[in-house]
Amino acid sequence: MSSIDFPGGSGAVRARPLPTGTRSVLTDPTDTDGPASTAPERTGLLPPHPSQDDATGASTAGAPAGLQTGTAARHLPRDAGSLSPAQPTVVLAGLLWLAAAALLAWWPDLTFQPLGRELTALWIGTGALLILLGLAGDRLGRVGRWTRARGPWLAAIALFAAVWTVVTAKTGWLPQPFFPTPQAMLEVFLYDWPKILHSASFSVWLLAKGFFFGATAGFAIGIAMGWSRKVSYWATPLLRYIGPLPATAWLPLAFFIFPTSGSASVFLIAFSTAFPVAVLTWSGVAAVNRDYYEIARTLGASPRFLILKVAIPAALPHVFVGLFMGLSTSFAVLVVAEMLGVEAGLGWYLQWAQGWAAYANMYGALFVMAAMCSGLITLLFRIRDRVLVWQKGVVRW
């Protein structure tokens, strides 16, 4: 029986050198990169490309990038064209902030505006920092990724600041005091921050209490309705006719029943939160695959186990949808309740600023409200991602 000669063989399989002229199509059987290539360079139809090695100094002219060998080729990045350290958008945002600062400093104001130099220095510092971050770019790691993702927004905010300055302080196209200038807004946050901070903390505490009670009640009601047909029979009509009513419609009754305006506000916030949480929890429990229950019962699971280990985990994505909806509605009820009966909070501060025609303070309160609501939604997203880590890749909202 004749033997087959493979390169590097032993025994009956004798080794022989590969021909130096035309390249053989036969490859090493230990090669795991795939089937033998029939490209012209491999079959010998074209002469091999010259390569360059740092040790030999041979020429690499005309060699494709994928066929280069040696130390220089080994140290090339995988995608050298897409890895640009600098971030032009962030640098552009910094230049726009510097332009806005120049416009603020060199264009005279129609009327006296306080803190003009301080605001100019703040914008110059912001522009210089963004330019440095943009030049450093991806070398800063997480900070570089953050600036790259938000570069267009940083540039848009700079343009908005410049236009805001022109239409208020420089030309007066938007009349004051109904539309305050950037200098007036800086004055509010610089001198009235203790009152704003106290109002924001009071609002957060009031919202936390109402949201907790409402979410707890809605979650319990939704689980009971989704699990028990009897509870669903009696609770569905009440939830259908009472739940859609706006919580602000209960303001007179709530302030009459509860002893303090704070407790009445907590009830209204809880009421606005409970309805969406209950409906979505009920829907989540009712949508659980019945095969899960049957399999668990076959293995000897008790009703308590079915509720805690099967129904609730499967319904959690729906529960979080209800929590997000309840948070938005409860925040709206919070502002209304504070404007009507509570002696502190952002809603109270907004009402106070409007009464004194302090429109800069009113816009400052609105800005803090938006930041607070955005922060709470972000926090709820983080909690959602931590709780639903077992559904990573399935939940896409």
Image (spheres, rainbow, N blue to C red):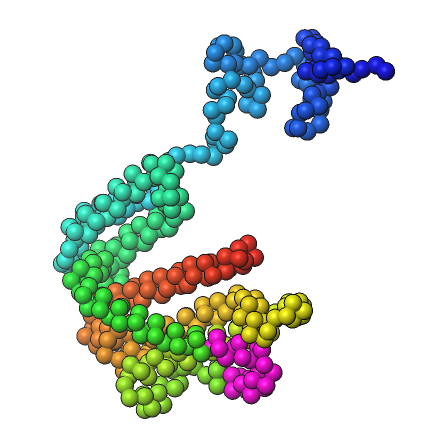
Name which quarter of the figure residue 214 lies in: bottom left
Marker count (numbered): 0
> Could you tell me which residue is drawn at 59 percent across and 75 percent down?
303
Q: Looking at the picture, does residue 51 appear above or below residue 146?
A: above
**Magenta-drawn stretch contains 200:** no
Judged left or right of residue 91, residue 219 is right
> Could you tell me which residue is drawn at 58 percent across and 71 percent down?
306
Q: Nearer the viewer, residue 173 or 4?
A: 4
> Could you tell me which residue is drawn at 50 percent across and 79 percent down?
221
Percent x, y of residue 365: 27, 67
Percent x, y of residue 28: 69, 21
**Magenta-drawn stretch contains 239:** yes
Q: Looking at the picture, does residue 87 appear above or below residue 236?
A: above
Q: Nearer the viewer, residue 182 or 195?
A: 195
> Is residue 306 visible in the rendered structure shown here?
yes
> Could you tell me which residue is drawn at 38 percent across and 46 percent down?
146
Residue at the right extreme, as displayed: 1
> Is residue 44 visible in the rendered structure shown here?
no
Q: Looking at the picture, does residue 91 appear above or below residue 387?
A: above
Name which quarter of the figure residue 284 lies in: bottom right
- In the picture, the quarter occupied by the N terminus is top right
Name which quarter of the figure residue 89 lies in: top left
Judged left or right of residue 315, residue 170 is left
Percent x, y of residue 50: 57, 13
Task: From the image, give the main secondary structure of the stretch colored magenta.
Answer: helix
Judged left or right of residue 25, residue 390 is left
Percent x, y of residue 124: 22, 45
Q: Which residues are magenta?
A: 218-241
Q: Nearer the viewer, residue 291 or 198?
A: 291
